Image: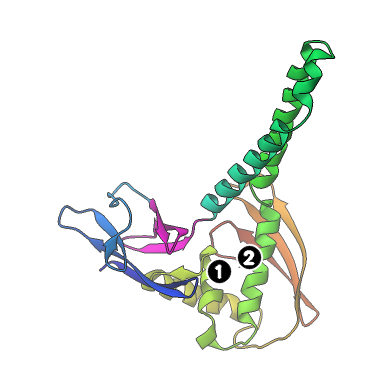
Amino acid sequence: MLATWDLFVDGTLYTVSVERMPNGKDSIRVNGRIAAQPMGSDDQERELSVGGTPHIVRRAGTDGFQIAVDERADVKRRTQATAKAVLAHAADSPLPMVKSQAPGWLPVAGWAAVVAIVAIVLVYATGPSYKKQAATRMQQVLHEMQSGKDAEMQFAVCLWAMNVRVLDLQSMSVASDHFDKWRQAKNLYGRAFTRYKIVSSEEVKDQKVPTAIVTFTIEDEQYKVRVPERREISWEN
């Protein structure tokens, strides 16, 4: 067995596993049943459904894997639903009735406006900007750090390291060590707190991966971090 996770989805426990088959490919199973096309050595990720919720399994290092909710699938569903709603509303509009009362170009212009509206909707439906995503991620990390107890840091470690809620054992071990050193650098290791706040988030331009500088406070003491997408968070100063 290369990796295994126990996931609770809508109150139901599902066991997701990855195992190497005799042909060298990696099989992904949910509760013992094959849930996706096997991954070849050149495949980096595979989409699957766990309890009706889209997830994605990715390779992480040599024979390592990680699993996370597939946010892209959720965005796609919302985009399609919103676009269909706009087009359905447009179909019920009075535009076709104008044809006999106005120049022939008006219906075309009307439909052009509908297309423009759909385009705008699609832009906004793709999700928040990265600086907002980074701020939300840091807020979640702080929420999971509040107790200061190492036994309750699992989600904090995963979110801090790769913005996921579950890591395989090998990746978790490495991430946990790095996370402890990160906390120690600002005397946050083992420290409990009750108040925290995201102050600002600004995207850094010309980066290979989306990156934002997030400023936050803990008990009114200010901190600043660099938050690259799906990579470890680091102190900015």
Q: Residues within 10 Å of mark 2 (few under 14, many from 20)?
A: many
Disc 1 + disc 2, Cβ < 8 Å = yes
| Magenta portion: prevailing SS class | strand
Instruction: Give the camera-side residue of 164 and 188.
Output: 164
Q: Position of residue 115 (x, y in %)?
A: 70, 29
Q: Secondary structure at mark 1?
A: helix
Query: Is tag 1's residue or tag 2's residue first in the polypeptide sequence?
Result: 2
Q: Secondary structure at mark 2?
A: helix
Q: Position of residue 234 (x, y in %)?
A: 61, 66
**Does residue 235 appear in this view?**
no
Q: Is residue 171 above or below residue 122?
A: below
Q: Amino acid at mark 1?
A: Leu
- Residue 59 on the magenta segment: yes
Residue segment shown in magenta: 45-70
Q: Which mark is residue 137?
A: 2
Q: CA distance from mark 1 to mark 2?
A: 7 Å
Q: Quadrant of the C terminus?
A: bottom right
Residue lying at the far top in this picture: please name it.
Answer: 103
Left or right for 84, reference 157: right
Left or right for 39, reference 233: left
Q: Which residue is located at x 69 percent, y 51 percent? A: 129
Give residue 174's quadrant in the image: bottom left
Q: Is residue 7 above or below residue 130?
A: below
Q: Which residue is located at x 61 percent, y 51 percent? A: 210
Q: Quadrant of the N terminus?
A: bottom left
- Residue 102 on the magenta segment: no
Q: Is residue 201 above or below residue 114?
A: below
Q: Which residue is located at x 79 percent, y 28 percent? A: 94
Q: How many marks?
A: 2
Give residue 218's quadrant in the image: bottom right
Give residue 13's quadrant in the image: bottom left
Quickly name the residue at label 1.
159
